Structures are given as structure tokens and as C-alpha cells.
Image: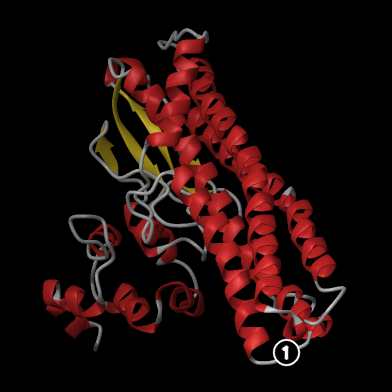
Amino acid sequence: MNEQYLNQTIRRIVYLESLKQSEINNLSAHIKEIDDLVKSLMLDEEMTDLTLAEFNKVLTSVKTGVATSLSSYTVAVGASLTAIAIDTYQFETKSLNNAFEDVKLSTKIDDAKKAKIVRTVKNTPLSVTGSEGKTVTDLFNELANNESNKYINHIKLARYEGKTNQQIVQMIRGTRKNGYKDGLMEVTARQAKTIVRTTVQHAAMQGKAEFAKDNADIIKGEQWLSTIDGKTSSACRSLDLQIFELGKGPRPPLHHNCRSTVLIVLKDEYAGRGNINKRASKDGPVANESYYSWLNKQPKEFQDDVLGETRGQLLRSGGLSADKFAALQLDKNFKPLTLDEMRAREPMAFKKAGL
């Protein structure tokens, strides 16, 4: 694989993470809207003093206000997602043109193609664990609906328990002593941030997938590329550097907050002679190697922190190569295996590691 293309892709990953944070930063204005709404509704009579009809009217205002604020935010994020996907398609075109002398792809992208990319982003279901089969629209609709229901259910319970308006506001906003990190709004913010990070990654990968399909005549596959640090998931660790036929392998995001990507692997006649000899890690460039090959060289404490003590011991003392260890982590559907399932497949490795 061409080193220039790899470096361009890594820079793109950094850019994408910054873009995720930018979209997340825009959330604060919408959280403030919810805060202002709650405070305004709690200024007058105590919830416990209201008639049922009056109380239900307050609940309707809360539900509508929270849903409207979150829906407004997700519409803005949705516009960004389509722009990200289109930009990713164009980036791959320019990136391959710059990195490979024998690649001469057109950089033009017409409105019909842009519209197709937009549909792909919106309609392609995610394979994210816990949200399998859901689309971007599903995730955002669930956010607005679930969070608004959460607010009214908590307020109902608070009124039943006889809590004051001040206590209800505190329940929603959180407490000053905990930096307002223990209220419902913080939970809402965390949920929204997770969805934003996941859907931005999805949009970028769909833009790349569309590019790959359009240029299948020069592409033979895709290579999984995981971030090399202690936060990488077990599934992504095991898939790192594996090459799959075009359209045959898993695609990021594999889980919520996934940061993995794929590299386009060109057919031999287009790939040239370039080789990757460096890639990014938490400590800067490292020699080109898989995640578990890199992890095997890290301190014991770091290995156990990433894998857990049992898997860490198996990595160090089980006599398995990095590739064999990686293959032992996932089933045929790329889902993580339990320790018992791993032991059934490689009993001698567990015995050798004293496990």
C-alpha cells in the first residue's frame, strides 16, 4: 500500500474527529433551550399544587419543547452528514490521484451522484452493536422521542413523590457541587454526542463505499484500519489491517463511537511500488504492524488495562502469534467471543498461559 495514501487517510481521520467535536459543540445551545424551558415552567405554582389538567399541560410543554430542540439540532447535524459523505467521496478521488501515478480519476461529481450519496447515507442501515438495522433517521428520531419521554416520566414521578419545583429543576439540571453532570440534561448530552460521533463516521464510510462501488474496476478490496491506542474496541483491534473483497467485509462504524476506517486497496496494476512503513499510534508513528503486534510490545499494565487480565496473560504467554490472537477474538460474524468460547477453540493456549 502506498505510504502517501496512508498518511493522507490518517490526516483525514484527525480531521473527522475534529469535525465530530465541532458538531458536538453546537449541541450546547440546544441544551440551554431545554434548560430555559424547564426553568420557565417551574417559576410559578408548585407541580404538586396543580390540578391534573394543569399538570398535563406542563408535561405537554416539556415533551414538545425537548423534542423540538433536539429535532432542530438533528436537522442541522443531518445536513452536515450529507456534506461529509460527499466530501469523503471527493477526498478519495483526489487522494488516490495524488498518491498513485497510474490513477487518473475524474474529480467531477454531478448533482445526481450527490443525491445518490445522500440517499445512501440516510437509508443504509448501521451494523452498530445495539442499533443493528437502524438508519441515521431512526437514531435521531429515537433521540428526540426517548429523551422527551424521559423528562416527562421523571417529572411525573417527582410530583407523585411530592418534590418541590426546585428539586425537579435540580433533578433535570444537575447539582452545582457535581458540576451539573448528574442531571437529565447531562444524560441527554451524552446520548446526543454518541449518536453524532457514530453517524458522522457512518456518513464518511458511506461516502467512501459509494466511491469504491463507482470505481470497482480499479479496486480489489478494502483494508480495515483501527486507531492504535488503549480505547480501541476488541472487535476493531482484531479486524485491524485485515483485507476484505470489495463489499464483502464489515464496515465501520462497528459500534457506537467507532473511529475505525478502511483503506482502498487497488488492483496490482494500479497500486505501483509504494509501501507503508509507518502508521499512527497514540505515541506517534510506529512501524507498520497490526494492533495486537503493537500491543504485545506495550507494558503489562497497559495490556491488562486494554484486554483485561485474562486476555492480557493469554496474549503474553499463550504462544499465539498476533494474527492468531486477533482471529481468536471474533466469531464468523465479527462479534467478540467470550473467554469460554475462546478456551474451547484454543485450549492449549490457555493451558500454556496457566489459565
Q: Which corner quadrant of the image does residue 78 belong to?
A: top right
Vertically, is 350 above or below 276? Answer: below
Is residue 1 visible to us here?
Answer: no
Q: Identify the residue position indicated by label 1 in the image.
A: 163
Q: Nearer the viewer, residue 119 or 339?
A: 119
Residue farthest to the bottom, as pictured: 161
Q: Residue at position x 32%, y 73% from top?
A: 315
**Residue sitting at x 18%, y 74%:** 341
Which quarter of the rendering shows the C terminus?
A: bottom left
Extreme right residue here? 43
Against 78, is 350 above or below?
below
Other residues around mark 1 within 10 Å, as few (<14) / some (14–19) / many (≥20): some
User: Residue 110, percent across and down?
Assistant: 50, 9
Which element type, helix, strand or loop, lies under badge 1?
Answer: loop
Q: Position of residue 13 (x, y in %)?
A: 56, 41
Q: Position of residue 272 (x, y in %)?
A: 37, 19
> Relative to residue 77, is residue 320 depicted above or below?
below
Q: Considering depth in this image, is 87 or 91 the residue closer to the camera?
A: 87
Q: Is residue 136 visible?
A: yes
Would residue 100 be found to the left or right of residue 78 on screen? Answer: left
Label total for image: 1
